[in-house]
């Protein structure tokens, strides 16, 4: 029993931290990690934790079961037989979750445990890296359900090649992992047995970068292409000068000159088991 006298509600999203890497795991395989109100609530809570925790430097988002995420929970979105559909539960917290991942100053790696559909692909596109087994399949199924890929378009259209975006968002056709990599949805499609090593390789490379430098570079990747060239050059020269004189920049340069690993602050945090 919990403090309120009720039975504890089992979490649908778990967290674990090891060596500066927080792993957040969607764990509702029964409905293929569909974006139910409960799962979204737990996911927001776990992201809040990972973003606030000083020792967490990299976030890995993954799932259990054969599917990473099947998109909006269609059982929740369906009206009672004969009743009217009142509101759409998925629209309450999903936008904020996508914002949290997109704007996270800590890099986020999506480790797809398998296939993804619709809203699940919005999460994939929000993450900075997406690594999937080469057996996974993908589809933007919304139009086939008579709904639209509205919220997810905000992240997906920033990743996908425009021709491919029109093709797959309009047709709802299923495509494989190699094609997903080709069109910009995935960073890498790898044999399943190489999935964990590939994720660990990216996480390790990210831990070598200065935390502030990574957070700023993440913004540059998104914002600089939208700047006019002259204004971009001026603003970036100012930013570059600030970074050379920052404590983090000076530590990185000193480490190079002294032939030693850089000592970044915050340092990777304590390890704690699954929760
Ligand atoms: C994912 C595969 C390929 C796995 O395929 P599979 O592994 O063969 O699994 P399955 O199809 O046998 O499903 C297993 C169980 O998961 C349930 N399930 C499965 N998906 C959902 C779901 N979304 N919501 C609720 N329940 C779901 C499904 O109903 C079933 O429950 P059971 O019959 O055993 O009780 C298949 O299950 C599938 O195609 N699912 C539907 C995917 C889909 O079309 N999702 C669209 C969601 S709409 C959306 O996301 C809108 C949004 C957010 O993008 C809008 C916006 O951006 O604005």
Image (spheres, helix red, strand yellow):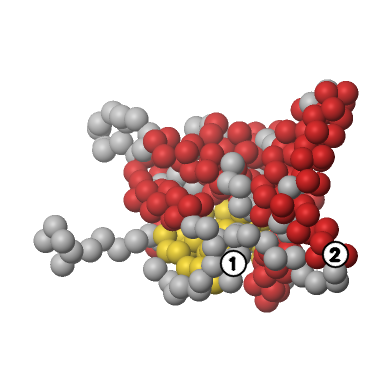
| Residue in view at x 71 percent, y 52 percent | 247
| Residue in view at x 82 percent, y 62 percent | 254
Residue 208 locus on image (x, y percent):
73, 64
**Earlier-in-chain disc, 1 versus 2:** 2
Q: Can residue 211 be seen by looking at this rendering?
A: yes
Judging depth in this view, the residue of 101 and 117 nearest the camera is 101
In this rendering, would 104 be left or right of 1? Answer: right
Given this view, does label 1 or label 2 mark the residue nearer the observer? 2
- C-alpha distance separating marks 1 and 2: 20 Å
Judging depth in this view, the residue of 43 and 36 nearest the camera is 43
Judging depth in this view, the residue of 78 and 127 nearest the camera is 127
Q: Which mark is residue 247?
A: none
- SS state under label 1: loop
In this rendering, would 154 be left or right of 214? Answer: left
Residue 36 locus on image (x, y percent):
38, 48
Residue 21 locus on image (x, y percent):
58, 65
Which class describes the residues within 10 Å of circle 2: few (<14), some (14-19), or many (20+)?
few
Residue 187 locus on image (x, y percent):
73, 55
- Residue, disc 1: 268
Measured along the vertical axis of the image, is residue 48 above or below residue 92? below
Q: Which mark is residue 256?
A: 2
């Amino acid at each position: 029993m919990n403090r309120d006298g009720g039975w504890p509600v089992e979490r649908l999203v778990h967290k674990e931290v090891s060596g500066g890497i927080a792993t957040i795991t969607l764990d509702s395989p029964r409905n293929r990690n569909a974006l139910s109100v409960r799962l979204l609530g737990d996911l927001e809570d776990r992201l809040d934790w990972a973003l606030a925790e000083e020792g967490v430097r990299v976030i890995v988002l993954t799932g259990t079961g054969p599917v990473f995420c099947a998109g909006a929970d269609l059982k929740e979105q369906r009206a009672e037989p004969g009743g009217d559909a009142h509101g759409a539960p998925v629209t309450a917290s999903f936008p904020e979750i996508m914002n949290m991942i997109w704007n996270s100053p800590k890099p986020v790696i999506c480790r797809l445990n398998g296939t993804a559909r619709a809203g699940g692909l919005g999460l994939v596109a929000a993450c900075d890296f997406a690594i999937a087994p080469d057996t996974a399949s993908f589809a933007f199924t919304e139009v086939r359900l008579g709904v639209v890929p509205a919220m997810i378009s905000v992240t997906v259209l920033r990743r996908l090649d425009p021709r491919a975006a029109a093709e797959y968002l309009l047709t709802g056709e299923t495509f494989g992992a190699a094609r997903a990599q080709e069109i910009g949805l995935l960073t890498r499609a790898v044999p399943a047995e190489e999935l964990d090593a590939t994720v660990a390789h990216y996480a390790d490379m990210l831990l070598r970068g200065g935390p502030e430098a990574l957070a700023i570079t993440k913004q540059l990747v998104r914002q600089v292409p939208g700047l006019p060239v002259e204004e971009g050059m001026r603003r970036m020269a100012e930013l570059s000068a600030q970074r050379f004189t920052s404590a983090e920049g000076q530590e990185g340069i000193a480490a190079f000159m002294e032939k030693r690993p850089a000592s970044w602050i915050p340092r990777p945090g304590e390890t704690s088991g699954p929760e």
